[in-house]
Amino acid sequence: MNTDKKKEQSRKRQQALRDRRKALGQKTITSVLSSKEYEMLTEICEFFAPPDQPLTEDEAVSSMINRFHSFIPALRITLGNCEKCSRELPTGCDGFFKGDTQCWHTLNRMQLHQLTRPKNFVRTIKVET
């Protein structure tokens, strides 16, 4: 098989893959990870995988996105509204009143990143005996 024919077949396969992904509404993202972050991702893939096969990196990232996104409704309730502008947090005034002592963006914006679990989050662990 000559190289031109191989290139043409490869191009067609890649185009078919792009078309399938587009039809499914899938998007491709690229992320640059430090070596430590990549090690952590690899550990996540191994730890949360079924016994017979590891998760792919795509599956692990997708799983993490879905899990953390599920926290948003409870976090919105926990955050409530800004005392200064009375708008829903974390958006609030979008920093318009930043610097004002009553503005959430002045006092608490960094705390959002520390809210790893909503108040009503319950961890359940099954222990089989």
Image (cartoon, grey):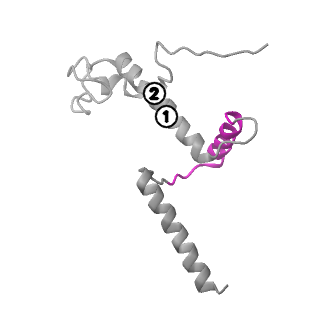
Which residue is labeled 1 in the image? 66
Provide the major secondary structure of the magenta segment: helix
Mark carried by residue 1: none
The residues colored magenta run: 30-49
On-image quarter of the N terminus? bottom right
Question: Could you tell me residue 75's position as x and y percent?
Answer: 40, 21
Which residue is nearer to you in this view: 97 or 49? Answer: 49
Toward which corner of the image does residue 88 lie, by quadrant?
A: top left
Q: According to the image, label 2 marks what residue?
A: 70
Residue 119 is left or right of residue 51, and the answer is left
User: Which amino acid type is marked by label 1?
Assistant: Asn
Residue pictured at 75% horizontal, 15% vertical: 128
Marks 2,1: beta carbons within 8 A: yes
Query: Which residue is depicted at the point 53% across and 74% down?
Result: 11
- Figure quadrant of the C terminus: top right
Q: Nearer the viewer, residue 39 or 120?
A: 120
Task: Name the residue at 44% across, 51% down.
Answer: 24
Residue 36, horizontal then vertical, whole percent: 65, 44
| Residue 38 magenta-highlighted | yes
Q: Secondary structure at mark 2?
A: loop
Estimate the x, y position of residue 89 in percent, counting from the top left.
30, 24
Could you tell whether 34 is left or right of 81 in the image? right
Which of 94/39 is in front?
39
Q: What count of labels does the image hold?
A: 2
Identify residue type, mark 2: Ser
